[in-house]
Amino acid sequence: MREPAGEPEAETREVPFRGGGFAPRPRRWAGPLVFVLLIGLLEWGTRTGFISSLTLPRPSAVFATLVQLWQSGALAEHLLPSLQRLALGSLMGISAGIAVGVAIGLFSLVRAGLVPLVAALFPVPKIALLPLFVIWFGIDEGSKNALIALGTFTPTVVATYGGVDNVDRTLIRMAQSFDLSWWSIVRKIVLPGALPAILSGLRVSLAIAIILLVAAEMLGANRGIGAYVLEAGSLYDLERLFAGVVILSLLGIASSWLVSRAEKLLLAWRPR
Amino acid sequence: MRLRVERVSHRYGPTEVLRDFDLDVPAGRITCLIGPSGCGKSTLLRLIGGLEKPASGRILQAGEPPSGCLNPLTYVFQDFALLPWRTVEGNVRLVLEDHGLGAAGMRRIVDDVLARTRLSDFARAWPRQLSGGMRQRVAIARALAVSPAVMLLDEPLSALDSQTRALLMDDLVDLWLRTPFTAVYVTHNLAEAARLGHRVVVLSRRPGRIREIVDIESALQSRSDDDAGLKAVRDRLWRAMREEAMAADRELTGA
């Protein structure tokens, strides 16, 4: 544009910046900082008596309890059975869930038959079924594993068939145009294409597995983190109760970290 | 290998896409199908390659595919259709894996086609790291790997910018000059058809029928933009297309 002749030169200023934001960026320090601040606040509050020792234990005392738990060998005694239940139960639930999810994604008949069933199972609080499972699978490990398996099964099924549905159909047409076999298409296109959805479903499944693990152990176990927490609660031993809670939180963080590792490893091809 | 399309009609629901369509695809030459958008040219290509079944009529192939041909009718797609979870060489290998060629045999073919498309340095790159033009070259390498009898190219350059398009057209000409292949090349771009086609078939708007067939005699390597003969061909094609394009445009906006 040309300035009209004879007009005095207009004031110039910079165009204000209006873009930016709405793009999460990594801030590694923020997460740990929140923990440190919160724990520091609790420590200060319980030491000064601002927070009564009846309402919250002192963080340092909880830490001491954890150390003692570790040294006495009680940690392994409670943690190992819990980890075993978690691993076994979720392994069964997740592998069955992926198999059924892929079958739903691939076969119309299976989809028509099983999607309503999965929808019916999904909202049922699995803990309510524990007494039934005790009768079916026995009071020992069987019922706990089955509970965790069922709890991880339904979210995995839903995530998996959603992932299969979202696989780019043009890639499948391409594969057909090169005469790839049906099995090759499933293995090389459908499964890798659904993998991102399956892995993010895994996050949900593992969190559910931990919740169910504790619930099952609270209802009937002598050993395990859930049993430990229940016992501490009924004795009103806040230090031990919180030590158990900390272990559960760490378990959650560990499982989420494992999924992140798997994503990094298996989904290196994804645009970042 | 020659292809013949005989009285093919096709419809999607109430929409008639092709009516009584006849076409001959001669061997060793590039046949361009050009027409306004939505005229059924991509549908025709899918019918030719057996990805869809025509409502009536048939598609015939005459003669045996040459020996060593792993997939006689091979597509190159507009959106490249590369697997994002496979590297460049992995994408090429995908179409060879079902043929029991052995590791060494596959290696040889992959190296050969990557060299022919000048992609050897990018064998281990992920598709996301490549530009659009490079991705389409990977797709072309993949198509060459199965040594097709007929290449079916569905607007292969339409997703690319015009500079990249010009470069890839030169690549395609080079590939054809080295080993002439039979091709059906669908495009809506006049310049591409005039540059690459030995025969250009202009389609009418929906339902698609042949409006005009133009044979271009000049050799592929001697065609340039300021060629007077080629300009006459382009003008002739444009006159044939113009009316159809305008009518098709009105149809779309009126819908």
Image (cartoon, helix red, strand yellow):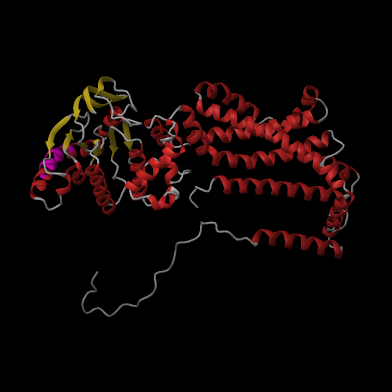
Q: Image point 24% across, 24% down: which residue?
A: B63
Instruction: Specify whether residue B228 is in view.
Output: yes
State the image coordinates of residue B60 (x, y, percent, origin top left). 25, 22
User: Outermost residue, right direction?
Assistant: A235
Q: Quadrant of residue B13?
A: top left
Span shown in magenta: B235-244
Q: Residue furthest top?
A: B56
Answer yes or no: is residue A238 visible: no
Helix, strand or loop for the magenta stretch, by majority? helix
Is residue B214 part of the magenta span, yes or no? Answer: no
Front-most of residues B88 and A124: B88
Examine the rendered structure and indicate whether residue B57 appears above or below residue A188: above
The answer to whether B101 appears left or right of A213 in the picture is left
Q: Is residue B241 magenta?
A: yes
Query: Which residue sits at x=80%, y=42%?
Result: A80
Q: Work out which quarter of the rendered image holds the N terminus of chain A and state it.
A: bottom left
Is residue B84 rendered to the left or right of residue A160? left
Q: Is residue A138 left or right of residue B181?
A: right
Q: Residue at x 63, y 32 (%)?
A: A95
Q: Position of residue B123 (x, y in %)?
A: 42, 49
Q: Nearer the viewer, residue B98 or B10?
A: B98
Q: Position of residue A231 (x, y in %)?
A: 88, 42
- Give the camera-side residue of A76 and B34: A76
- A149 left or right of B117 in image: right
Q: Is residue A74 above or below residue A22?
A: above
Which residue lies at the image location 29% right of the left edge and 45% below the top edge? B157
Q: Is residue B208 above or below residue B161?
A: above
